[in-house]
Amino acid sequence: MNRCVAALITLAAVGLGAVGCATSVPVSVSSPSPSASPSPSAYATPPPTPTVAPYLLGSLGALGPLATPGPAGTPGPEDMPIPNGPELAQSGVLQPGGVADGILCEKNEKFLFHVHARLAIFINGEARQVPMGIGIAPPWKVDHKPDGNVFVSNGACFSWLHTHTPDGMIHIESPVQRTFTLGDFFDVWGQPLDVDRIGPYRGRVTAFFNGQHYLGDPRDIPIGYHVQIQLDLGNPVVAPADVPFRGGL
């Protein structure tokens, strides 16, 4: 699986130098195994979903007519539909140590809490995938499922924010109690995010937080337990969808 990586990941927390562009992500391939199953939430009682100030949320009606989302896509290994579209941008290449924003990439998944959020991205009305392996350093162990789906089950280290499949599910597995933001996730990814940019694409960004129009800087959107985030760049703007989390995630 050759993947040209354009992003530079800054290893600040442990004083390591920057890693340049790599031409491929080493992977090892394995057959399906029980260990490839997504980890359930670490909570018996789910933590509260993050909230934002009311003044940062606007009416969907103020946006005018919204496009209807296309087909949801085939469910992946996490029982979340994988968007019918190409990747927004390839995942960055990490090394153990500091990644960004005080977030570490550690050898094992270590967490005081383990929750999941969902990110959907549309460019000019067309769905884009959030790639697998964001926040997981190579070499990857990739499990191939009988239905053709893949799941990155292991790597040299795991960032506190990472993805296992291209379904938009963000795993938040942190050994410290803090509120993470969408900007933190994009920094781990190695892609820019701003009011007029999503990864390599430039234009007006419309953001949604749990089905409501988010009026602030998309970098500041909190990610946490079952938060649903959608980013649209350009037109048409797609109506936000509420996709259920299944399988104990």
Image: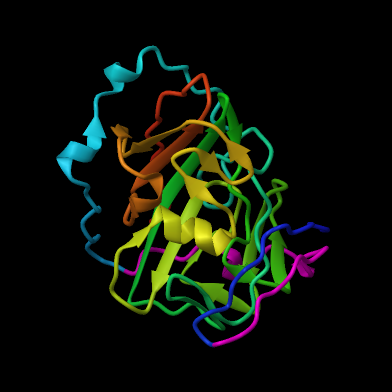
- Residue at the (24%, 53%) spot, across then down: 50
Taking the view exactly as shown, the residue that stands out farthest to the left is 54
Above or below 13: residue 131: above
- Residue at the (44%, 80%) spot, across then down: 110
Residue 246 is one of the magenta-drawn residues: no
Above or below 41: residue 118: above
Residue 179 location, x and y as percent? 30, 64
Instruction: Left or right? Give the position of 167 relative to 143.
Output: left
Instruction: Left or right? Give the position of 173 relative to 159.
Output: left
Q: Is residue 249 visible?
A: no
Residue 246 location, x and y as percent? 41, 48
Quadrant into which the N terminus falls: bottom right
Depth order, front residue of 175/237 = 237
Quadrant into which the C terminus falls: bottom left
Instruction: Left or right? Give the position of 212 relative to 20.
Output: left
Residue 84 location, x and y as percent? 64, 33
Q: Is residue 98 visible?
A: yes
Above or below 24: residue 239: above
Residue 38 is one of the magenta-drawn residues: yes
| Residue range corresponding to the magenta coloring | 15-42
- Residue at the (39%, 12%) spot, across then down: 65
Taking the view exactly as shown, the residue that stands out farthest to the top is 65
Where, by quadrant of the figure, is residue 96 drawn?
bottom right
- Residue at the (34%, 19%) spot, across then down: 63
Depth order, front residue of 149/168 = 168
Depth order, front residue of 12/45 = 12
- What main secondary structure does the magenta stretch of the protein show? loop
Residue 6 location, x and y as percent? 72, 57
